[in-house]
Amino acid sequence: MELSTAIQELSQDVLLIVALPIFLLAVAAEWYYEKYKDLEIYKGKDFLASLSMAMITAVVEFLPKVLAFVAFYYLHEWSPLRDLIGRQWWAFGLLFFLDDFAYYWFHRMNHEVRLFWAGHVSHHSSEYMNFGTALRQGAGERLHKYFFWLWIPLLGFDPLMIFVVHSFNLLYQFWTHTELIKKAHPLIEFFMNTPSHHRVHHASNIRYLDRNHGGVLIIWDRLFGTFSEEKDFEKPIYGLTVNIETYNPIKVASHEYGAIWKDVRRAKTWKDRWNYIFNAPGWSHDGEDLRAVTLRKKIYESGK
């Protein structure tokens, strides 16, 4: 396949754009239900900030997405498996698992590397859990996102296949952002990422911090030790451990980059500067260690 043909095919990958009106209808239905039942799961300014972040992210992602597609194209052309793997049904089935595996590690690293967290934190900055929050994507994470998928075209999967399967992954994740669905059948809860599992992921409770990173499947979290079940005795508290108290989309998107810069400037050694950039959020050279793994260890040791 010629690169020009591949790029022309990419222009036809409009799945997420087509899905946007459905997303907005779902938001409207959820908002109506909230008013009907007198719930408190939406706030006007918060939703507008989420919608603004969706638009900012769409603009920021355009160039990295095109560059990633070109990189995928050449990696696929170099692959010795490119004539073996076509667009057969079984290839799409295998790619589904490979894509979700890549997403798990991309998402997990967004929580465990502070520079990556700075690009992802905006998605967690809402103190509400609703379909609108699903639109509050991290703009900065789009700059490093596709590096986590570079190995897949080397296995013989063409770039359009990768983008299509990934779009379906993102479509699925939209529906996990709700409080209205409690828990599914235990078998589904065991294998799939569900609203219950994703409420845990968005919670700032120490028990739940940096847990449940899966996209469609939750099995990766179970395999790699990052799974946590939603407990009846501990309701998720949404937002950040220290909330930013702003609805300004520019500040929502950039505040953690500013915080990293301030910490790097006050660090005394290059080792500490690198740690502020690449260690987990909460690391400090001269203060309390507030990394999730440290905080969780303390509550387990205290028997709480």
Image (cartoon, rainbow, N blue to C red):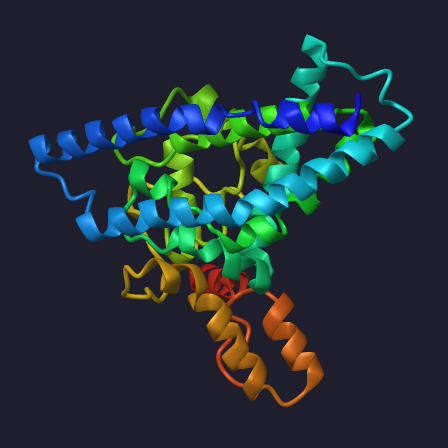
User: In the image shown, does 183 or 238 lie closer to the viewer?
Assistant: 238
Among all residues in the image, which is located at the extreme front? Answer: 4
Residue 135 shown left or right of residue 147 in the figure: left
**In which quadrant is the N terminus drawn?**
top right
User: In the image shown, does 59 or 25 lie closer to the viewer?
Assistant: 59
Residue 244: x %, y % from top left: 33, 66
Residue 255: x %, y % from top left: 42, 67
Residue at image location 91% in from the left, 26% down from the top: 80
**Picture quarter containing residue 189?**
top left
As displayed, is residue 137 above or below residue 222? below
As displayed, is residue 237 above or below residue 287? above
User: In the image shown, does 242 or 186 lie closer to the viewer?
Assistant: 242
Among all residues in the image, which is located at the extreme right? Answer: 80
Residue 168 shown left or right of residue 278 in the figure: left
Residue 155: x %, y % from top left: 81, 28
Residue at image location 47% in from the left, 59% down from the top: 300
User: In the image shown, does 119 or 293 lie closer to the viewer?
Assistant: 119
* One can see residue 285 in this view: no
Residue at image location 8% in from the left, 37% down from the top: 38
